[in-house]
Image (cartoon, rainbow, N blue to C red):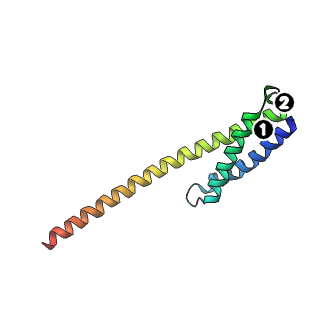
Amino acid sequence: MPDDVAHSLRLINRALSEVVDRLQQEGLNPLQHKYLSSLRASLAQGGACIRKIGVKQRAEPKVQAELSQYRNHLRDLMEILSVSQGRLLAEKARLHAAGERQRALQAWAQAQER
């Protein structure tokens, strides 16, 4: 049974690793829906698998190693998303400021026509 759990976690870790590596290389710029779907599915599978692990199974070295790897992927993901959130907030502020300048220019142009 521990081998089944370790194998399941290994598959989940492999999928998470692919998505995390892609996000680290490319960032969120060209992020495609399939990567988000894969990430969401891997996280859901990981959560379900971890909830099913018993105390004895957690003590198995293979399971511990896979759980450690899973935690590392979550930490990497948290860091990537934190940095991306900052970039997205900065871009949102830049777009808002550009919109305000555009509205001010339109108002000025309309006032000049009168």
Image quarter hosting the C terminus: bottom left
Left or right placement of residue 105 versus residue 67 in this view: left
Give the residue pinned by disc 1. 66
Mark 2, residues whose alpha carbon is within 10 Å: few (<14), some, or many (≥20)?
Answer: some
Residue 65 in percent (x, y) is at 79, 35
Of residues 61 and 43, the one nearer the viewer is 43
Residue in the image at 71% along x and 52% along y: 18
Q: Which of 56 and 24 is in front in this view?
A: 56
Figure quadrant of the N terminus: top right
Label 2: state its secondary structure. Answer: loop
The residue lying at 39 percent from left, 58 percent from top is: 95
Q: Which amino acid does label 2 sit on?
A: Glu
Residue 104 appears in which quarter of the rendering?
A: bottom left
Dot 1, how many residues are within 10 Å of its Cα: few (below 14), some (14-19), or many (20+)? many
Q: What element carries label 1?
A: helix
Q: In which quarter of the image is residue 110?
A: bottom left
Instruction: Please tell me which residue is depicted at 59% across the width and 46% down the height of the picture.
Output: 80
Q: Which residue lies furthest to the bottom in this view?
A: 113
Of mark 2 and mark 1, the one earlier in the sequence is 2
Question: In the image, residue 46 lies at what x, y percent?
Answer: 71, 41
Q: How far apart are marks 2 and 1 (CA)?
A: 10 Å
Is 67 rendered above or below residue 107? above
Q: Which amino acid does label 1 sit on?
A: Glu
Picture coordinates of residue 47 (x, y %)?
69, 39
Numbered label attached to residue 60: 2
Q: Do the CB atoms of the residues marked 2 and 1 lie less than 8 Å apart? A: no
